[in-house]
Image (cartoon, rainbow, N blue to C red):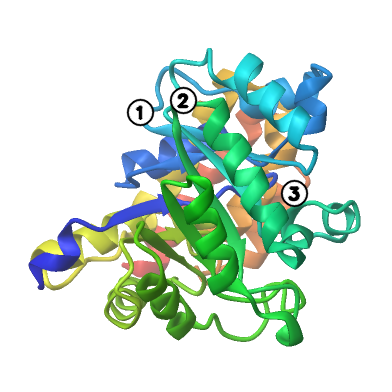
């Protein structure tokens, strides 16, 4: 395997309702180099919103978790960074989101809506740079739609404004998560700026990672949907880079990982909330396994962690009998 690929950073993308403390710890354990909190609103931070404080929580068990924020009001951005984020010694980086395609955020002039105006992109990046000594990255998209693709211009504005590196999700806002990520665009951005570029979009396997790095020449990758139910992808990529092959985890390891994920989540959140939030994770973890639909449905009807763990042990035995 090429030595030029072994130094590439592999990150977990911020995903609303997914990348909480417990899942970030699980991904780190499986080889993820860097994680980020779920996206935090600058406006909510400015008003000391309690739910936002929960989203920002980073455990002592996490080694390299950073914060992602979004907003559009430059004065609020500077105030929040200076007063709320700079004092946090456990955060080394601030990621600013200019790529979120969600209608609520877009229609509020935030996230990917900012891409319409490269001068505003520059001003926000400059304000961030003037507000902190922490590393700054900007996560963004190709443009709002196919008629307004301006990722090179925006990337250069971000570089001029003082961003330390860029993360490009190679789709437009209009495309949301459909179609295929344009890895060639990431290569063009890499050639057009003098700061590191991280590739984002359609990396679901180690083979995807290798291909994306070869096509784009990027300095690393950020994995989003590819990690949902599959935190092992970080381990797979590193094993593939080291040995030229990787071994997929067994059903037994998957069940053990689900239980560990539950146990971690219960350290940080109320049991009822954990059980509700973990239902989607369990569905992702066991997708494709024998009798997964039946056990997913049963998990969705259970209301205590004790019942969950008993059901997982039962499912482990069923899978063991099926695979013998």
Q: Is residue 302 above or below residue 318?
A: above
Residue at 45% over, 41% down: 35
The numbered dot on residue 100 is none
C-alpha span from label 1 to label 3: 32 Å
Residue marked by disc 2? 91
Disc 2 element: loop
Residue at 59% over, 45% down: 125
Q: Residue 259 vs residue 53: left or right?
A: left
Q: Quadrant of residue 116?
A: bottom right
Provide residue 182's location: percent of width, then percent of height.
52, 83
Q: Quadrant of residue 3?
A: bottom left
Q: Is residue 147 above or below residue 173?
A: below
Residue marked by disc 3? 300
Residue marked by disc 1? 63
Provide residue 98's location: percent of width, then percent of height.
67, 55
Q: Earlier in the sequence, mark 2 or mark 3?
A: 2
In contact (CB < 8 Å): disc 2 and disc 1: no
Q: Earlier in the sequence, mark 1 or mark 3?
A: 1
Q: Nearer the viewer, residue 250 or 117?
A: 117
C-alpha span from label 2 to label 3: 35 Å
């Amino acid at each position: 395997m090429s030595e030029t690929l072994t130094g590439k950073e592999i990150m977990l993308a911020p995903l609303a309702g997914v990348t909480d403390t417990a899942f970030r710890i699980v991904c780190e354990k499986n080889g993820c180099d860097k994680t980020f909190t779920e996206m935090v609103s600058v406006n909510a931070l400015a008003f000391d919103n309690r739910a936002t404080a929960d989203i920002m929580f980073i455990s002592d068990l996490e080694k390299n978790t950073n914060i992602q924020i979004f907003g559009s009001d430059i004065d609020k951005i500077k105030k929040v960074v200076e007063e709320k984020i700079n004092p946090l010694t456990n955060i080394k980086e601030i990621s600013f989101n200019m790529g979120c395609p969600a209608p609520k955020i877009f229609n509020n002039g935030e996230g990917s809506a900012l891409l319409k105006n490269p001068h505003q992109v520059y001003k926000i990046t400059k304000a961030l740079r003037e507000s902190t000594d922490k590393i700054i990255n900007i996560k963004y998209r190709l443009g709002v739609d196919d008629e307004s693709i301006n990722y090179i211009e925006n990337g250069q504005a971000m570089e001029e404004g003082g961003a330390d590196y860029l993360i490009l999700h190679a789709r437009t806002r209009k495309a949301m998560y459909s179609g295929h990520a344009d890895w060639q665009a990431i290569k063009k951005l890499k050639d057009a700026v003098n700061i590191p570029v991280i590739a984002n979009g359609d990396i679901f396997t180690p083979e995807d990672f290798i291909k994306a790095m070869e096509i784009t020449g990027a300095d690393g990758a950020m994995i989003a949907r590819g990690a949902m139910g599959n935190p092992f992808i970080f381990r797979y990529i590193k094993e593939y880079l080291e040995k030229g092959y990787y071994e997929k985890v067994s059903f037994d390891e998957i069940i053990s990982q689900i239980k560990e994920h539950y146990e971690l989540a219960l350290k940080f959140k109320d049991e009822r909330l954990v059980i509700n939030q973990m239902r989607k994770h369990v569905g992702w973890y066991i997708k494709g396994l024998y009798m997964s639909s039946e056990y997913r449905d049963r998990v969705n009807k259970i209301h205590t962690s004790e019942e969950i763990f008993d059901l997982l042990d039962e499912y482990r035995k069923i899978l063991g009998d099926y695979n013998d």
